[in-house]
Image (tube, rainbow, N blue to C red):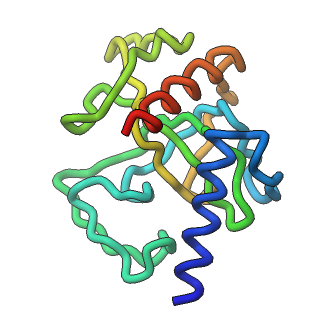
């Protein structure tokens, strides 16, 4: 039980670091170089909270022990990194997609200076509840892609507005 409580405290610190960067303690960055504003790829089955159709883990913060059930194959999706890794390697991300689940608050990707997909058109950025994912489950783009910092701050503001309005 104590391990579970410690995990929750670590994840709350990650959320605090994103919403109020000056208040959170600096975190150790290890493994894959992950920075705020990076655009990376991730499988939704690794998100915490998990999307519908994914069976929960018997230990909620260990993405390596999960059994998944899919309605069709779900591949890599672009995500925007919102925080530095915490001391366990977890980061907050927000997904980008052309079809988010119903009820997901979104904004056009172009509002944040992100380009249009030449085949699929305008993508939508989730500005609702950020997802937690371990940095080992992120895949970098080649070449490296990141948002301009001013646009990252706009996205951070929009997510903060949603978060504090709940």
* Apparent side of residue 5 relative to residue 68 in the rendered image (left or right): right
Tell me which corner region of the image, top left, top right, bottom left or bottom right, holds residue 14.
Answer: bottom right
Q: Quadrant of the C terminus?
A: top left
Q: Position of residue 128 (x, y in %)?
A: 40, 36
| Residue 131 against residue 82 in the figure, above or below | below
Tell me which corner region of the image, top left, top right, bottom left or bottom right, holds residue 47.
Answer: bottom left
Q: Residue at x 44, y 11 (%)?
A: 116
Tell me which corner region of the image, top left, top right, bottom left or bottom right, holds residue 55.
Answer: bottom left
| Residue 129 against residue 99 in the figure, above or below | below
Q: Position of residue 157 (x, y in %)?
A: 56, 24
Q: Residue at x 42, y 50 (%)?
A: 43
Name the one closer to the observer, 106 or 162.
Answer: 162
Q: Position of residue 103 (x, y in %)?
A: 22, 35
| Residue 40 against residue 61 in the figure, above or below | above
| Residue 85 against residue 127 in the figure, above or below | below
* Apparent side of residue 109 relative to residue 89 in the rendered image (left or right): left
Name the one closer to the observer, 80 or 24.
Answer: 24
* Apparent side of residue 158 relative to residue 152 in the rendered image (left or right): left
Q: Tag count in the figure?
A: 0
Q: In the current view of this chain or complex, which residue is farthest to the bottom?
A: 1
Q: Residue at x 47, y 35 (%)?
A: 78
Name the one closer to the observer, 162 or 104.
Answer: 162
Q: Residue at x 70, y 58 (%)?
A: 86
Q: In the current view of this chain or complex, which residue is farthest to the front?
A: 165
């Amino acid at each position: 039980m104590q391990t579970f409580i410690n995990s929750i405290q670590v994840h709350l610190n990650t959320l605090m670091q994103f919403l109020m960067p000056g208040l959170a303690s600096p975190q150790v960055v290890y493994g894959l170089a992950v920075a705020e504003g990076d655009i990376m790829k991730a499988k939704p089955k690794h998100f915490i909270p998990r999307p519908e159709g994914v069976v929960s883990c018997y230990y909620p913060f260990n993405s390596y022990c999960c059994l998944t059930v899919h309605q069709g194959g779900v591949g890599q999706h672009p995500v925007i990194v919102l925080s530095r890794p915490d001391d366990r390697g977890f980061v907050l991300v927000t997904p980008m997609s052309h079809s988010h689940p119903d009820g997901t608050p979104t904004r056009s990707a172009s509002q944040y200076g992100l380009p249009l997909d030449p085949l699929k058109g305008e993508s939508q950025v989730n500005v609702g509840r950020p997802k937690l994912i371990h940095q080992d489950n992120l895949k970098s783009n080649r070449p490296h892609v990141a948002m301009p910092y001013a646009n990252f701050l706009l996205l951070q503001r929009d997510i903060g507005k949603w978060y504090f309005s709940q």
